[in-house]
Image (cartoon, rainbow, N blue to C red):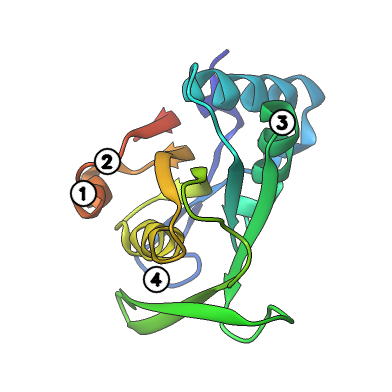
Amino acid sequence: MDFTSYIRDIADFPKSGIVFKDITPLLQDTLALTKACDTLCDLVGAVSVDKVVGVDSRGFIFAPMLAARLKAGFVPVRKKGKLPYNTISETYALEYGEDSLEIHTDAIQKGEKVLVHDDVLATGGTAKAVCNLVERLGGEVVQCNFLIHLTFLNGADKLKGKQIQSLISY
């Protein structure tokens, strides 16, 4: 299936000079949504997964579906201050400042195999921060899995040593 035909470019969003990759056309099409989830699972291969970590906010769309299909638990990683229980946080650089992500302290157990999922791998800062959180809790990141990889932004450079898979590459 040509998933790129379901991705809409939005110029100058969220700010001037950015071309946003809008995944809502893919989400609205039953066949494309189902096939995307199937293919993302296929990209995991035979690797055993205990937890699927989904990144706030669009990573929450596919991560729970992947977790259910992989017979794994789902763990949300959220922006600072959004999780109700004890957390650890990781700060990372953005083009225009910094941000922080948090995970519950009991979300990942030592030795658990973890799939990190987000909608887009761009500059890699968010994905690297999530991997750091998982590893600080004793988990092993077995793959970083994305719907879209913007290869021209070199985000994979921040994930050296991690297996990276994506449905679509630009």
| Residue 57 visible in the snapshot | no
- Residue in the picture at 43% in, 58% down: 138
Q: Amino acid at mark 4?
A: Ser
Residue where numbered disc 4 is placed: 16
Which of disc 4 and disc 3 is earlier in sequence?
4
Instruction: Give the CA separation, mark 3 to mark 4.
Output: 41 Å
Q: Which residue is identified by label 2?
A: 151
First in sequence: mark 3 vs mark 2: 3
Tags 1 and 2 touching, CB below 8 Å: yes
Mark-to-mark CA distance, 3 and 1: 32 Å
On screen, 27 above or below 167? below
Q: Earlier in the sequence, mark 1 or mark 4?
A: 4
Check residue 137 in the rendering and tell me which mark sits there, or answer none. Answer: none
The quadrant the N terminus occupies is top right
Between tags 2 and 4, which lies in front? 2
Give the Cα distance between marks 3 and 2: 30 Å
Residue that numbered label 1 is attached to: 154
Compute the Cα span from label 1 to label 2.
5 Å
Q: Earlier in the sequence, mark 2 or mark 4?
A: 4
Query: Where does the image place residue 22, in percent across and percent down from the top left?
Result: 58, 48
Question: Toward which corner of the image does residue 165 lie, by quadrant?
Answer: top left
Residue 71, numbered label: 3
